[in-house]
Amino acid sequence: MEVKETVIRLMTRLAIEHKAVNFSQGFTDEAPVYDMVWSGVAAMLGGTEEGVRRLDSMTLREILDAQGRAGSNSLDLTLKELLEGVRNPRDQLNQYSFPFGIPELRHAIADYTEAFYGHRPDPEEQITVVLGASEGLAVSYRSLLEPGDAVAVMQPYHELYPSQAEIFGFVPRFVTLREDRDAGTWRLDRDEVRSVVSDPRVRAFVVNTPHNPTGKVLGNEDLSFIADMCRTYDLFAITDEIYEHITFDGHRHSYLAGFEGMADRTLVVNSISKTGRSTGWRIGWVISPPERTRRLRAVHDNLVVQAPTPLQKGAVSLLRRERTFFEGIAEGYRRKRDLLLGGLRDAGFVASPPEGAYYLFADYRDVPALAGMSPTDAAMHLIKEVGVATVPGDNFYATGNEGDRYLRFAFCRSMETIEAGLGRLRERL
Ligand SMILES: Cc1ncc(COP(=O)(O)O)c(C=O)c1O
């Protein structure tokens, strides 16, 4: 199998080249959560637990006094010069730490999971800190499956799922979400699910909810069905829950591992990428049944050793934030969704309102300038002629031709960026 650059990242490269408004890759252009950033910075500069505590409470007066600069031209010092003076000459927090995650972060993950889903995973036996959900998926795959095994993947999909499966020599099998235009939602094709998961080679089911790219939030009925399939056919579930806090219009994220009989067959993959607006930090985690953890950690340790120590400290601060912070995340995205949805509909796109996550999967066939084009041609036209970058819909499908009508728009950008993109659509499309 040829391992290629992902199309999503390719579209981002083209967006830069053509100075297009980038609706392609799922990362924000807004600042990450400050508490998290500060804790990462404090870990890097403070160097030790004691040093971090000192920095957390240090005032400007204390810094200047300590540097013998009080009263001098200290107001002209740059922040960089000032902070150099508070650096700890001793260090621990920029060095290797536990391969499977600093204890403080694993405890924070356990508390956070309990607070939202009522299940407390054991930090010693069940939680492994990894490099984002991407590595979380890789180590989950490799710890559960052997080459030649098959894995059920929801389609349309994040290209990570089938690509990683192929890198490891697994066979991806696809179960399709189909748009129900009249109901304005997406539905899992249950007959297809039954037929795929009853194949004895299928050993795991990757479940992504809230879903990228359709915005579908699987409800309890769908998840009960999936749980039933996993129990009946003795499958593992690997859940990708990174959009857990981004749900709209009364939809709520449910935790598949909490369904009957699922705790010992579910690997939960999560990360701070979306919740902390910090896709570049590469901090994630996997919650695994205890008997699966040893192998998972061994794969992780051998491949990457560990996630960055100081950024794990930042993740602790994020996950320990008050509940209202997490509950408030969706509202900002809802406004962005509504803005983009309205603008795209005005331009002739047809789309069911996303129930969660931050993507709009829009049918472009009724947009006069794009009608009759393949998704790649439509996306190239939008980048080159209109100055708006999207991702071609067929990139999210392996079988059938249902993707040929869609383009994916990410609405995780600032309102101004979204307005700018819509302005270009209005003027140039
Ligand atoms: C569904 C899904 N899973 C995983 C990822 C990658 O997440 P991470 O940055 O935590 O590796 C993304 C990124 O957009 C995604 O949309």
Image (cartoon, rainbow, N blue to C red):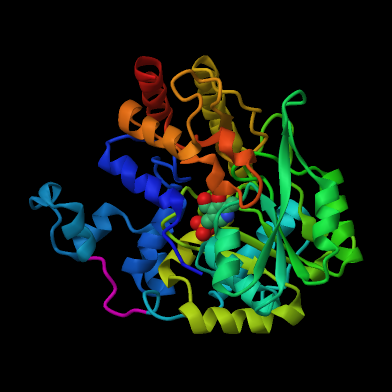
128 in relation to 28, above or below: below
Q: Nearer the viewer, residue 262 or 100?
A: 262
Q: Please indicate whether residue 265 sits to the left or right of residue 88 in the image.
A: right
Q: Position of residue 417 (x, y in %)?
A: 38, 30
Q: Is residue 259 visible?
A: no
Quadrant in which ligand 1 is drawn: bottom right
| Point 60% across, 60% down: residue | 161
* Residue ID at (66%, 38%): 247
In this rendering, would 117 be left or right of 413?
right
Span colored in magenta: 85-91
Looking at this rendering, what residue extends furthest in the front direction? Answer: 372
User: In the image shown, does 321 or 68 lie closer to the viewer?
Assistant: 321
The quadrant where residue 309 appears = bottom left
Residue 318 x, y percent position in the rendering: 53, 54
Q: Position of residue 143 (x, y in %)?
A: 66, 78
Quarter where residue 95 is shown: bottom left
The rendered magenta stretch, by its main secondary structure, is classed as: loop
Residue 2 vs 382, above or below: the answer is: below
User: In the rendered structure, does residue 140 fall within the stretch colored magenta?
Assistant: no
- Above or below, comparing residue 189 to residue 69 in the picture: above
User: Residue drawn at (84%, 57%), measured in percent from left and top?
Assistant: 195
| Left or right: 214 as drawn, with respect to 45 | right
Compared with 237, 244 (above or below) is above
Which image quarter holds the C terminus? top left
Task: Identify the residue at image location x=14%, y=63%.
Answer: 68
Out of 208 and 284, give the one closest to the viewer.
208
x and y percent of residue 118 in the render? 79, 56
Is residue 334 at least partly visible in the picture?
yes
